[in-house]
Structure formats: C-alpha cells, structure tokens
Amino acid sequence: MKVLNGWRQLVCTALLAGCSQASWASEFHDPDDGAFDVSDFLLNHKGALPVPTVITEPAVGYGGGLMLMYFDQSIAESAAESIKESGRPQPPNITGLGGMMTENGTWGAGAVHFHTWDGDRYRYLGAVGKGSFNLDFYDRKNQPHSYTLDGTALVQQLLARIGDSHWYAGARYVYFSGTSQFKGKYAEAAGLEPQDRRIGKGGLVVDYESRDNFFFPKSGSYAELQAQAARGWLGSTQDFETYDAKGYHWMPLSKAWVLGARVQGQAARGDVPFYALPYVDLRGVSRGRYQDETTLVGELEARWDISSRWSLLAFGGAGKAWGKWNDYGEAANVYSYGAGFRYLIARKLGLAVGMDIARGPDEGAFYFQVGSAWR
C-alpha cells in the first residue's frame, strides 16, 4: 500500500469532504448558471472539517474511513495573503487525523500535516500511521498467497522551489517497521515464519509543476523523480535502492476535447522485502497483483466536456512487471481500460468529482474520484 502521495492528495481529499458536507444545503448554486456549486463554501472554509472516504480498492475490498481535517486559514485567505507577499498563491496549512477499515479486515489509523512557507516556496509533508493489511502475494506462477502485514510508518518530506521556476527539489525520508505473516497451506508447506523487517530509506525528490489546475487540468505537465536508498544507518534491516520516475501531460485538442498521457517507471535493486517491490498501477488492476523488481506503465485518457459542468472520460493503459520472477519477455502484458464522468462541482477552483469504471485482465473495479485519477 502506498503512503499518501503528497499535498495534492491531501487537499483533494479535504475538498471532497467539503463537497459532501455542502451537498445538504440547497442554497449552494452558482449565480452565473444556477447550477449546484460549492466554490464559495470551499474557498472560505477554515477550522475543523470531517472527511468521509469510500474505499473500493480490489486488493483490500470495500470499506470506508473518516478523517478530521483542520485548516489554519481558508483557501481564499491563504492565497490572498501569499499573493501580496510573493505574487504566488499558496494553499493553507492542513492537519488531519483519522482511520479506515475494509471488509477483509484491513485497518489503518494515522495523522498527516502539510505546511507551506514563503509564498509556496517551501513545502513540508509529514505523516505517521499504524495499520494491518490483509493482502495477496502472487508467485512466478501467478498463484496468490494470502499474508498479513502489520506495521507502523513514518514519512518526512521537505521541498523547495528552484528560483522562480516550475521545479521543486528536496529530501524524503520513509520509515516502516512491520511484520509479514503468510497464511494457510502455503505457509505450512514452505515453513514460512513471521518476518520482522524495518525499512529506513532516504533520498532525493525532484518535482516539476506547470498544470493550469492541479485538480482537473486541461493543459500543462507534472513530473516527479525519486531516488532513495535503504541503509542500516537510516534504520533499515536490509540494504536496497528504489527509483521512481513519472510524468503526466495534458493537451487541449479543441475547446471540448482534452488528451492526457501518463508514463511511469519504477525499479528496486538489492535486498528488497517482497511487499516493497514495485507493482503495475492501473485503474482496474488490483494493487500488488503484478509485482517485480522493475515496472513500466503507460496510459492515455480522452476527455470530452459535453457542457460547462459535465465531462465524459475514456481511458486505457498497459503495464509490465519483470526482473526477479520473470524476464522481460516472459512477463505478462497487463492491459486495462474504462470510462468515467466528472461534474464541475467548484467552478472557481476547477474542481470536478465523479466516478471511473475500469476493467483489467482479472477483474473490474470502480473508483470515486476527486479531479484527475493521476496523483
């Protein structure tokens, strides 16, 4: 399971909660077109906000969670204040505390804090959590073996803008202390005992951000490069390295059509715990289903804005995992495809919400989405 992916995910989740809370009030309408809209509510809200979440991930089953978010300023106040100081808007500082549970017994609880300084020149993200995950590991014959992963995780990240450019660079530290235990006849036959492992890794993070809107872009790009090493002096029981490079680009084809493209490659080298190996990450594919030392994923998404509020999406992608269990030529080609819709629920923020339905090689899945599915 991936740790919360930065401040974009945090802000998106908080805004979804605001939309849910606002939907009970009939007076939330846009004066320009009379449509349901929560822009003013979200722009001016500060203080505590309960955040409900719905989980539909096939790897852990259906479930839900609740997080209490605290905004030190409203989005409008924070943006106006930073524009006066630096000429750039910045999001408010956000603190969250909550938990989740799914139908297969997976649970988790944690806290997260996002903070910016100097007109969004510096960005800090910190998180700590504890949980128990009931998952499947697939061997080289594609046979699933159930296991439980119990542990505690810590993430610390600090990024700084490079000059007045679209680039950010900084450091990230990740710590995880956990126990993995396989279940059933497979564990008995293989004589597998519970394994206690600690992962302590640190390294460099470089971000590029030129999207016109980070919730639901129509143009621009986002890219991130990561290189991290796990070593004993960082708290790790095993030495290994991980690398991650991803890039998203959106291009308007006409007034009503937008084409998006996504590419991501991941690699892990050294004595890597099996649950920390990269996996093919596509809508419609269970997390961890296709896992190995190296993964490569590509995805295209076409969006049709059928009105000023409603959009339809069609998407498809392909991926591959290889290295430890299979050579590149022997590894399975993984495909997925699907469709979805979005409703522009906060026009002033460019925020849209909706649902995606996707089909992979093994099963289908649906996802509630806030803005783009690409984080």
Image: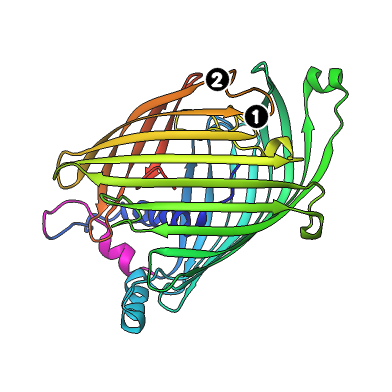
| Residue 288 horizontal/vertical position (percent) | 60, 32
| Residue 355 horizontal/vertical position (percent) | 35, 37
Q: Is residue 250 above or below residue 210?
A: above
Q: Give the mark nearest the N terminus, 2 or 1.
A: 1
- At x 32%, y 56%, the residue is 211
Between the residue at mark 2 and the residue at mark 1, the CA separation in whole angstroms equals: 12 Å
Classed neighbour count for the residue bearing mark 2: other residues with Cα under 10 Å, few (<14), some (14–19), many (≥20): some
- Based on the picture, tell me whether residue 35 belongs to the magenta stretch: yes
Q: If the image is split into quadrants, where does the N terminus sit?
A: top right
Which residue is label 2 attached to? 332
Q: Is residue 211 above or below residue 47?
A: above
Q: Nearer the viewer, residue 341 or 374?
A: 374
**From which residue to which does the magenta span run?**
32-45
Q: Amino acid at mark 1?
A: Gly
Q: Nearer the viewer, residue 320 or 338?
A: 320
| Residue 311 horizontal/vertical position (percent) | 23, 40
Q: Is residue 169 above or below residue 280?
A: below
Question: Please, what secondary structure does the residue beneath circle 1 have?
Answer: loop
Q: Amino acid at mark 2?
A: Ala
- At x 28%, y 41%, the residue is 342
| Residue 188 horizontal/vertical position (percent) | 85, 20
User: Can you tell which quarter of the image residue 324 is in?
Assistant: top right
In this orientation, does residue 359 appear? no
- At x 31%, y 41%, the residue is 260
Q: Is residue 113 above or below residue 248?
A: below
Which residue is label 1 attached to? 323
Q: Is residue 4 left or right of residue 37?
A: right
Q: Is residue 249 left or right of residue 243?
A: left
Q: Is residue 96 left or right of residue 221?
A: right
